[in-house]
Image (cartoon, rainbow, N blue to C red):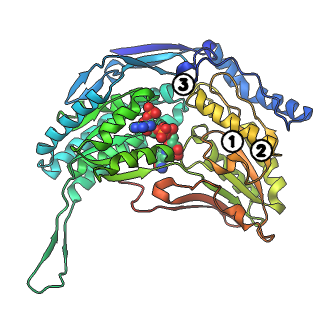
Amino acid sequence: MRRQVPVHLQDLQLRFYRTNGPVLPSQPLLLPGMSAAGVLRSRRVLQQLLPGLLASMSRRYSLDVAAPLLRTQGYVDGSWISAASVFPVLDPATGQELARVSDCGPAEAKQAVEAAHRAFQTWKGTAAKERSVLLRRWFDLMMLHQEDLAKIITFECGKPLQEARGEVAYSASFLDWFSEEARRIYGDIVPSSFKDRKLLLLKQPVGVASIITPWNFPSAMISRKVGAALAAGCTVVVKPAEDTPLSALALAELAEQAGIPPGVVNVVPCSRDRAPSVGQVLCSDPMVAKVSFTGSTATGKVLLKMAADSVKRVSMELGGNAPFIVFDSADVDLAVGGAMVSKFRNSGQTCVCSNRFLVQSRVYDRFLDKLGRAMDSQLHLGHGSEPGTTQGPLINSRAAEKVVHQISDAVSHGARVLRGGARLNGSFMEPTLLADVTTDMLCTQEETFGPLVPVLRLFLLAGRQSDLAGGRGPGGGHGGGQRGSHVGPRGPVWWSQTVGFGSRGF
Ligand code: NAP
């Protein structure tokens, strides 16, 4: 049986009320630093960008997926549970409601922690092979339902369907990987400093892991943590983001179908209002042994404080402020290709998206010119389920407001808008290119999480090496590591330094 949730883009501007109240239809902004020619250019770009968006508006969209995958209750101890209230899940492209999901609170979170703690007593004793087989079955089911899972991601998170399919494959790959790793949790024999002693290291599961995840990879951020936990013999309670609980609940449905025992995987969806009280249980309950979080640095700090009292093990994957550096010696076409890839995936909403572009003087104008043209020809806004769409909406109006704020701050400090600059209807943002950006502007200091390319002129020999340093805020991603990319004579070089753990793991 399949279930269809119809969604209409004509109501695009109507309902972005959840976080900020109603939003009126946006007009293209005339920003302080924008000339009349700039406005005309922006209009031309809009016409190129908008056909997809305008065509989308007259179409009807429906989330058509196998009914069992569209779960709307919490999943605790192998049962689907309702809470006293519900919260709406919206399609960010249309503002229309996709579903109403149980708004779990501290009581349900506690219930989930207790269930996970009970299940841990037997799960930790299962044979490695058994855990491996169950994870592999879960992987197989994910791939079997790849298309439906991708549609759920597109409708609740806005990313183009092609990217969503990629996320499902990426997400499932963690289950595949950890199904194999489950069989290889070897110990060690360590030489002792004493003749009469032998040191044997045994790896033991720590217990219940609380998993708190963001909306921008609503499937992959869950499986990469849960896969590792289950392989090790831990049990989990997952709190997905308010914007994207449906992907998490679909994963729970498939975990059940795969035969993962009750209580081993629990999911407690909740609204943003309830996140702090649910987070309090998940980060401080004595039955929780480990907290694994991916999200913003600000939230990470809050969770760390909550986890500190009971000295829990904690893994934090936080926000980024990745630089993209182009030297005079670079191949500018390669640099532009790299910039397009590293900036515009998921409309600029990934933690590894380049956030500030530092371009050396001699290639500065050429880079801007070519990048602007690439943006004109390659970026197409629309509903994520339209085949031609490369840029979906931002996740909600709060996210769009942040980008608009950064643009107007930059323009008020002297930046020039070369492309875009406007907020469109709902939470759609024009891909925006800013020139003459300096390090005192907000867009270079904080993570944007949107389709904004702020380009700084890099003077390496004129005592301005500080341009290479971070903004005022710490980069912070991957537990304090740095990420980024630069383009030299041999093309783009991606670099990443992580602290404490690899990119796979939890
Ligand atoms: P966020 O606002 O920090 O939210 C992340 C998760 O934390 C959501 O589930 C959120 O719930 C929850 N949360 C917020 N406050 C909480 C509290 N007091 N107690 C318990 N849970 C709480 O981040 P986001 O906006 O969803 O995601 C974007 C950020 O994630 C960016 O900074 C990005 O760089 C980062 N990110 C990093 C990586 C990485 O690998 N390093 C990967 C992806 C994303 P609600 O949704 O209900 O608020």
Real-space Cα separation, disc 3 to disc 1, in angstroms:
22 Å
Tally of numbered tags: 3
- Looking at the picture, which amino acid does disc 2 mark? Leu
- Image coordinates for residue 365, horizontal then vertical, percent: 84, 53
Left or right, 129 with respect to 447, comes to left
Real-space Cα separation, disc 2 to disc 3, in angstroms:
28 Å
- Image coordinates for residue 314, horizontal then vertical, percent: 34, 52
Q: Mark 3 or mark 1: which comes first in sequence?
A: 3
Badge 1 density bin: few <14, some 14–19, many ≥20, Cα 10 Å: many
Q: Is residue 344 visible?
A: yes
Q: Is there a contact, CB below 8 Å, between mark 1 and mark 2? A: yes
Badge 3 density bin: few <14, some 14–19, many ≥20, Cα 10 Å: few
Q: Nearer the viewer, residue 95 or 209?
A: 209
- Image coordinates for residue 302, horizontal then vertical, percent: 43, 44
> Label 1, on which residue?
452
* Residue at position x 26%, y 34% in the image: 266
- Looking at the picture, which amino acid does disc 3 mark? Thr
* Residue at position x 69%, y 36% in the image: 405
Find residue 52 and name its label. none
* Residue at position x 76%, y 35% in the image: 420
If the image is split into quadrants, where does the N terminus sit? top left
Residue 272, relative to residue 458: is it above or below?
A: above
Residue 159, relative to residue 498: is it above or below?
A: above
Find residue 19 and name its label. 3
Give the structural element (helix, strand or loop) at label 3. Answer: helix
Q: Residue furthest front?
A: 309
Left or right, 449 with respect to 256, comes to right
